[in-house]
Amino acid sequence: MTIIERIEALLNEGLDLKKVRAYLVIEDYKNVDIEAAIKELGLSTKAKKGFAAEYYDWLAGSARTKTEAEDFIAGTGEYGETTPNIKKHKSHYLNIWDLTARVWAGQGAGEEPSGEDSAEESADEVNPKVQAAWDKLTKAKAAWAKGKAPRSKGAFHPDKVSHLGDDALTSAYTKFFQEING
């Protein structure tokens, strides 16, 4: 039986790729051969997004209410199940919601939100250009954290967004501009 046939047989038994790989290692197949066979079959071992990554992406998508955040954390309704560990850390995830609610409200991280569901109330007032600038900055910061410098360091000069009238955005651009230009 070839390694490809063995992989297909194990997959047909209902095993996931991680377990198939473990079986093959136990059966003394070389890792190089396992990798080549997996690549030849076009199988992927990409890791699934964790809860935190999904939650942060969900919060970044649009302004959310505290009730929506609590439902997401609890795994009720349309959001799917969560683990007891996630539920145990509800206060942590609600603190993240609070921070994003402030950002969506345009108040920045240092000020108190105007109400429990302030993000929902101000979602209609968010200027699309301001939102696009926040999105651009968020993506650039994530890339910078991974070691990838922006194509144009001048693209994050605070003057590029100061005309939008959002002091928190201008301040964030200033900090990032100073960070990348060291």
Image: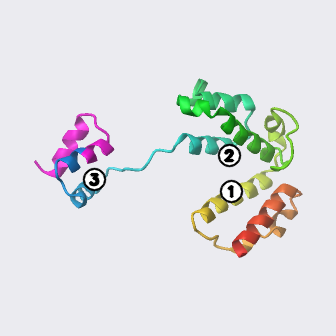
| Residue 156 placement (x, y as % from top left) | 74, 68
Whether tag 3 and tag 2 are in contact, CB under 8 A, the answer is no
The residue pinned by badge 1 equals 138
Say which of 47 and 63 sits in front.
47
Magenta stretch encompasses residue 159: no
- Residue located at (32% from left, 40% from top): 16
| Residue neighbourhood size for the residue with mark 2, other residues' Cα within 10 Å, grouped as few (<14), some (14–19), many (≥20) | some
| Residue 84 placement (x, y as % from top left) | 54, 28
Whether tag 2 and tag 1 are in contact, CB under 8 A, the answer is yes
Q: Amino acid at mark 1?
A: Thr
Q: Secondary structure at mark 3?
A: helix
Q: Magenta residues?
A: 1-22
**Mark closest to the chain's N terminus, 3 or 1:** 3
Query: Which numbered marker is on residue 38?
Result: 3
- Residue located at (27% from left, 48% from top): 21
- From mark 3 to mark 2, how far is it between C-alphas? 35 Å
- Residue located at (26% from left, 51% from top): 41
